[in-house]
Image (tube, rainbow, N blue to C red):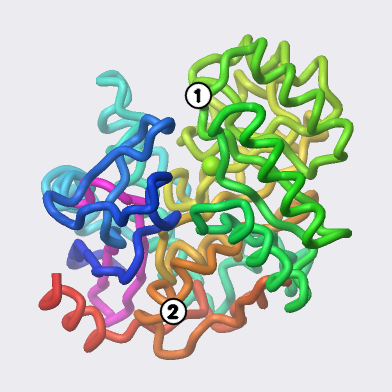
Amino acid sequence: MRITQVTTYVLKQRTESAYLGKLDDGTEPQADPGYFVRPPWRSLYSAHMETVLVHVTTDDGAEGWGEALAPVGPEVVAAIVDRMLGPWLVGRDPVAVRPLWDGMRDLMRERGHLVGHQADALAALDIALWDLAGKAAGLPVSQLLGGAYRTEIPAYVSGLPEPTDEGRARLAADWAAQGASMVKLALGKGIDADLATYDAVAAAAPGLRIAVDAHWVYTLPEALELGGELDRRRALFFEAPMAPEDIAGHRDLACRIATPVAVGEAMRNRYEFRDWLDRRAAGLVQPDVARTGITEAMTIAALADSRHVPVACHHSVGLGVALAAGLHVSAAIADCPFFEFQPTTMPFAQRILRTPLTAGPTGFTLPQGPGLGIDIDHDVLNDIIKEG
Ligand code: MG
């Protein structure tokens, strides 16, 4: 079997309300020019649901689907696939997934491109190759990875996209009533404001385990103060407390609080995760499979396992392909306590699938068919491209 074609699909779906909801001043982010910042966070966000899918076909008519997490600038990832990685893959045997990963890594490594959009492009192709390899073998990807530890994957509800604590508390109570046992708050709005939100949610939904995502905004002294308060409240985990390049700061924090320090969505490869794990700077690692690919996520999981650190895969604005890939990886990792359930992106994720994934606030069911176990609806893809 040989790869004959690699095609990219840049998708932009308009949403009624932006991912993570309104801005703190209660206004909706402007859809045009498309990208904006949510102060006090510093990253660019899109008012649309943006992603890039890759489609790999072979000379015997098989196909595999991949996706890169590309919430901003999916065209950049598509260009890397179209101009560099895709042409290199054509003519090669798709089931040699790990050698192909090594080959794609080597193409650009001396240029520093094991990170960023290049790594995202590699991730998308790697997912498509695992999908193809699974279909060729007639086995789900999780079986190719060594087998599933679980077919039901517990979830935490990510984000309570309401502008006020009253609204967030109400939403938390709603999720708890639907069976949710864990929720993650999108915070980093200042220590007092974060604790006020935490306490409002805890009061509205007693028994709910609560995690805090600080979106990289705090200094070490601030993170220590907030971390101490989270310890007293027995928080589930404390995500992205400081700048994502500050390994030493996170190590100092992780040594001094009991709440697990969670990082990983900003990283793409084993070398980055190894440095954090070696320095005991993370108590929970969160690779996003649509940024690492499946091959690298499993390698990262083995590194984490050797340091007795659990892995909880990140998932945000990825669609159904990224979601399915994340679920297969989550099933195939021994110490994987939960996966991220994103209520606002789920309708978009499911829209491209002929058969929706079983997903809800309590967890996900591992897809059982060959490969990723999903069936992409080409008509819907074409509709989305036309709408965009
Ligand atoms: Mg996060």
Viewer-proximal residue among 43 and 325: 43
Write down which quadrant ligand 1 falls in.
Answer: top right
| Distance CA(mark 2)–CA(mark 1) | 31 Å
Check residue 54 for magenta coloring. yes
Q: Is 171 placed above or below 98 here?
A: below
For residue 20, which quarter of the picture? Answer: bottom left
Question: Is ligand 1 within 8 Å of the beta carbon of the residue shown at mark 2?
Answer: no
Q: Nearer the viewer, residue 138 or 164?
A: 164
Q: In the rendered image, which residue does mark 2 sit on?
A: 350
In the foreground, 219 or 358: 219
Relative depth, front residue between 55 and 120: 120
Q: Which residues are magenta?
A: 52-74
For the point 65% across and 51% down, the residue is 184
Is 262 left or right of 232, judged from the image as shown?
A: left
Q: Which mark is residue 82?
A: none
| In the displayed structure image, the side of residue 196 where residue 354 appears, left or right | left
What residue lies at 47% left-to-right and 67% top-to-bottom?
A: 344
Tell me which numbered mark, 2 or 1, is placed earlier along the sequence: 1
Q: Position of residue 386 (x, y in %)?
A: 10, 77
Amino acid type, residue under disc 2 in the picture: Gln
Q: Is residue 155 left or right of residue 208?
A: left
x, y percentage for residue 236? 79, 44
Q: Is residue 6 visible?
A: no
**Magenta stretch holds residue 94:** no
Image quadrant for the N terminus? bottom left
The reply to whether callout 2 and callout 1 are in contact (CB within 8 Å) is no
The answer to whether residue 366 shows anywhere in this view is: yes
Which residue bears the numbered disc 1?
Answer: 244
Taking the spot 58% from the left edge, 28% from the top edge, the residue there is 190
Total numbered badges shown on the rendered structure:
2
Picture coordinates of residue 257, whole percent (x, y): 82, 22
Q: Position of residue 2 (x, y in %)?
A: 27, 66
